[in-house]
Amino acid sequence: MSNQTISIAEYRSFVATPFCQAGQAEQKRGRRRARPEEELHRACFSWVLGMRDTTPVLNYLFHVPNGGGRSAAEAGILKATGVMPGVPDFILPFPYLESNGLAIELKAGKNRLTPEQRGWLQNASRHQWVTGVARDLDDFKTLVNVFLGGVAGNKAGDNSGGSKTLLPGYTEIHGKAR
């Protein structure tokens, strides 16, 4: 089997087909199942694809497919092969400017971080990664832009480099102050 590659334009064309649209494969009794977090993942990755030509470091930002429903057998296989709970949804594992990496967890609706997810983000933060929770595309863009050299405001009097509220809700940036 040969390795084949496709262009970004071909990928975008493919994901725009009805076959790949969110919820198409998940039809139940004629109704489409809402999958807002999957739709957020798609929107975020589509934005990243559009930025890669001008921001090459984003070629190394990838999605970790830890979530989703799995059978007990498949979950056991994944665990035995090293899948870890709580790993953030998007990771860029290379240093850039003042950060050692980027880790973003996506949450849709009222979903909250699990203790494992919070632990991963806090630990990455201790190692000078930009980390955060994004509830929409704007949150995601903000976190990526902070990693790329943007500045997030500290809480009043907070120069410790600890957790800083970036936007209302659950979005936070963990890491050193800039």
Image: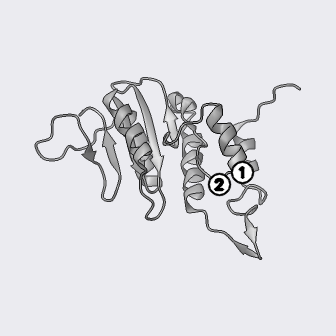
Task: State the image coordinates of residue 50 (x, y, percent, origin top left).
Answer: 58, 42
Q: Nearer the viewer, residue 40 or 46?
A: 40
Please indicate whether residue 27 sits to the left or right of residue 61 in the image. Answer: right
The count of marks equals: 2
**Element type at mark 1:** helix
Q: Amino acid at mark 2?
A: Gly
Position of the N terminus by quadrant = top right
Task: State the image coordinates of residue 165 (x, y, percent, origin top left).
Answer: 26, 49
Which residue corresponds to the image point at 75% horizontal and 42% vertical from the top-left?
A: 10
Q: Nearer the viewer, residue 21 or 86?
A: 86
Which residue corresponds to the image point at 57% horizontal and 31% vertical from the top-left?
A: 59
Which residue corresponds to the image point at 49% horizontal and 27% vertical from the top-left?
A: 93
Looking at this view, name the residue that lies furthest to the bottom.
30
Which residue is labeled 1 in the image? 15
Which residue corresponds to the image point at 30% horizontal and 34% vertical from the top-left?
A: 175
Mark 2 against mark 1, which lies toward the viewer? 2
Which residue is labeled 2 in the image? 69
What is the crowding at mark 2: few (fewer than 14 residues within 10 Å), some, or many (at least 20)?
A: few
Q: Is residue 156 visible?
A: yes
